[in-house]
Image: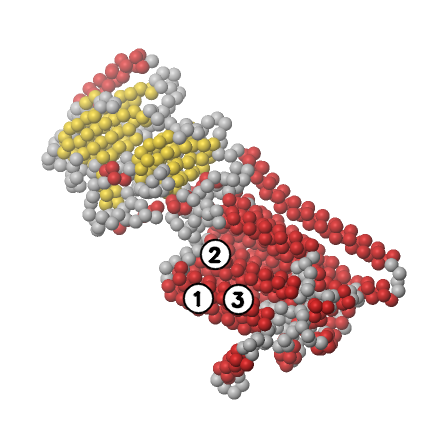
Amino acid sequence: MAGAAAPVLGALLCALLWAAAAAGGSPAPGTFGRVYRGTVNISTERVYAFAYSSEPGQVDAVRVYVNSNSENLQYPVLFVVRQQKGVLSWQVPLIFRGLYQKTYNYQEVSRTLCPSEPTAEMGPSDQVIFVDVASMAPFNIAYELLVTRLENFQLETNKAFNFTASPSQPQYFLYKFPQDVDSVIIKVVSDAVYPCSVVSVQDIVCPVYDLDHNVEFNGVYQSMTKQAAITVQRKDFPGEQFFVVFVIKPEDYACGGSVPSSIHGNVNRTWNLQRTKNLQVTIVPSIKKSVYVQAMFFSFLSFLSFYLGSVVVAFVHYIRVQRKALADRLSPEDGSGIMTSSHPITASTPEGSSYGAIDESSSSGGRQLSSPERGLPAGSDTDSSVEEESDFDTMPEIESDKNIIRTKVFLYLSDLSRKDRRIVSKKYKIYFWNIITIAVFYALPVIQLVITYQTVVNVTGNQDICYYNFLCAHPLGVLSAFNNILSNVGHMLLGFLFLLIVLRRDILHRRAMEMKDIYTLDYGIPKHFGLFYAMGIALMMEGVLSACYHVCPNYSNFQFDTSFMYMIAGLCMLKLYQTRHPDINASAYSAYASFAVVICLAVLGVVFGKNDMWFWVIFSIIHVFASLALSTQIYYMGRFKIDGPDSDLGIFRRAVMVLYTDCIQQCSRPMYMDRMVLLIVGNLVNWSFAIFGLVYRPRDFASYILGIFICNLLLYLAFYIIMKLRSSEKLLPIPMFCIMATAVVWAAALYFFFQTLSSWEETPAESREKNRPCILLGFFDDHDVWHFLSAAALFFSFLVLLTLDDDLDVVRRDKIPVF
C-alpha cells in the first residue's frame, strides 16, 4: 500500500511546490526525522513542506521541534505551521508570564500538531503540512527545525506510558473508549513534586489548548505535583475519544511552591531544560453500573438492620412486660401485693445510695411544694401556652426557697424536680421545635450554594475547586463524588430511628402516667423527651449537611459539615446535665443563642484564624472567661449572682465575699467537693485548649472548636458514670451494651477519620498527593467508612444517654443523688 502511494505523494508534492512558486514562495520539500538548520532575517523567509499518508481509520500525529540561539526578544523567530484545517504559530524565544508579571523565556519549543480526523475512505488519505520560518530582524538569526511522526500517540487501556514534558514542550495523547467500557480513570504519577503541572482532558477539537495560558480554556483540568486522577465518562464525549493534555507551569505557586528566589522584578531568564518533568500515565476502566447498585443496597441494608434489631429488642421488652403483668394478675391480692405493684418500694434500694448523711425529712419540702402537680390529672398535658421563662429557671417559688434548697451540701433529685411537670415538659419541647426551624433556615441556603458550586465545576471543568479523593470519586448525574454523599445516609436513617425509639418511650411513659397512681411520679428520673427529639433531628441534619459539604468539599464550606456537630455535642451535654437537674437547665433560647455565638466564632476563625494573632488572643480570653462563668453557674446551681443593692461596688463586694467564704474559710474542703473536682479538671482541659490555640494557631479552626466540645462532653460523661457507680447505682445490660458498642465503634471510626485522603488546608495539587483508592466494595473510601461508623457511634451514644438511668425507675427521687 505504501509503495503504491509513493507516486501519488510525489505528484501531489510537485503540484504544491509549483503552485507555491507561482505565488512567489519557494518551499523546500521536507523529510520527517531530518534536522534542518538555517538563518532568517527581514528579507529571508524559509518554507518547508512535509507530505505523508494515513491509513483508513488511523490517527497520525506530527510533532514539530524548533530551536534558536537568539535571546533577543525584540526580534524573535516566528514559526507558522499550516495544515488542511488549521494554523498553529509560536515564537522563539517563547515567553511565559508568571506571578507579578515575571517572564520566563524558552529557546527550545516542540508542539504536537492537531491530528486530522480519520476518514471513512477505502484508500489512504494524503496530508501535507507547511512550516514557515520568518523574522523581522535586520540581521541573521540561526534556527533548527525537526518534524517527526509520533508512533505512540494513542494510549492503551491498563498500559502505563512514560514521557517527559516542559513548559515549552507540552504533550498530549489520544484515547479511544473500548467497546465494553463506559467510564475510565486517568491516573498520572511522577516521582518529583515540582515543577507544577496541569492535566487536562479535552474533546477531539482543533486547536488543542496545550500551553499554560490557555489550557484552562477547554475541557476538564486539575493541577498536579506527584499524583492526579480524572474520571472520564463515555457519555460526555460523543466521539467516544478524547485528548489527554499535559502542561508544565512556569512557576510552582499554584501547587504550593514559591517563586524562584533568583528571579527579581521583570528580569528575563532562559530556562529551557531546567523545568522538565517525567510523567507516567495509565488509563484504567472505572466501576460498572452494577457496583453503584450494590453500594446503594449495602448502604441502606446496613442501617436498616438497626431497625430490625430495634424491633427485636422492643418485642422482647413487650414479652417481658406482658409476662410480668400476667404474673401480677395471678399473684394473691393481699396488702403486700398491692404495695409491690403500685409502689416500687425503696426497700429494694441499697442503703448506701443515700449519698450523704442528710435526713430524708429535709427533702419533704420539695414533695410538699409539688402538690399542685397532684391536683391535676396525669394526662392533662395540653398545648396551652407556657408563661415566659428565664434562661436557667422558671421556679415559681420565692427566691429564698431556691437558695435554701440548692445550696445544701447534699442534694437529691427531689430537690431539683419540684416544678410543674407540664411546664417543664413544654420547656424542653421548645428545643425540638426550635431546631426544626433552625434546620430549615440553615439547610436551604446551604443546598442552594453547593448546587452552585457543583454547577461551576461542571461548566468550567476546574477540578481544583473541590477537594475530592479523586482516586475514589464516582460520579452520578451532575454529582462528581456520589459515594461521599451516599455514605451519609446512615446519619439520616439512624437519626430517624432514634426519633422512633424516643417516640415509643414517650408514648409508653404517657400511658404509664395515665394508668398508675399519681404518687408514682416521685420515682425515677423525670421523663422529659424534648432534648432527645432535638438530638434525633440534629443527627439527621448532620447527615444532610455533611452530604452537602461533600458535594464540593473545600475551605469555604467546611463549616456546613461541623455546625450541627457543635449542636449535637452541646445538646448531649445539656441532656446529661438535665437528667439530674431538670429544674435548672438552660432554656432552648439561651442554648441555641450560645450555639449561634459558637458558629459565628467558627466563621471568624475561618476568615481570620490562619495568621492573625489578635484573633487568637481575643478568642482565648473569651474561651477562658466563658469556662469560668459556666463553672460558677454549675457550681452554685444557678444561684450565683454578682449584684449589690447599695452601689456599683456591690459587684466587687459579692466577689470578695465569695472568694473569702469558699476559698479561705473552706480551703481545706470545698462545700461541693464532687462538683469542684469536675470543674477543676474541666477548666484545666479548656485552658489547655486555649493555650494550644494561642501557641500553634491551627488552620482548621472549625475542627479545633469541635475538639473542645467533644473533650468536654467525654469528660462530663465519664464523670457522670463514675459518680453513678460511686452512688451504688447499677448499669443495666442494655446501657452497658450501648456503652461498649459506643467505645468500640468510636475507636474504629476515629481510625478511619485520621486516614487523611485530602486536605483543603493545602493547595489542590498537594491535597491530591493524599488521595488513595477505594477500600470497600470498590466504591467507598476511608472517609466513607468514617461516615458509616460515626453515624453508628452517634446512635449508640444517644442510646447511652437514653437508657443510662433506667435502673432508677424503681427508686424514689429523694434517694437519687444529684451530681
Q: Tag 2 or tag 3, which sits nearer the N-term?
A: 3
Q: Secondary structure at mark 2?
A: helix
Quarter in which the C terminus is drawn: bottom right
The kind of residue on which mark 1 rests is Ser
Residue under label 1, please give it: 620
Vertical relation: 52 (above or below) 727:
above
Q: Secondary structure at mark 3?
A: helix
Disc 1 to disc 2, C-alpha distance: 16 Å
Q: Secondary structure at mark 1?
A: helix
Disc 3 to disc 1, C-alpha distance: 18 Å
The label shown at residue 681 is: 3
Residue under label 2, please give it: 703
Q: Quadrant of residue 440?
A: bottom right
Q: Tag 1 or tag 3, which sits nearer the N-term?
A: 1
For this view, does 679 lie left or right of residue 150?
right
Protein image colouring:
secondary structure
* 477, 751: nearer the viewer: 751
The kind of residue on which mark 2 rests is Ser
Viewer can see residue 485? no
The kind of residue on which mark 3 rests is Val
- Name the spot of residue 663 as percent of width and height, x first: 53, 78
- Whether pointer 1 and pointer 2 mark residues with C-beta atoms closer than 8 Å, the reply is no
- Name the spot of residue 710 as percent of width and height, x first: 53, 59
Residue extending furthest top? 4
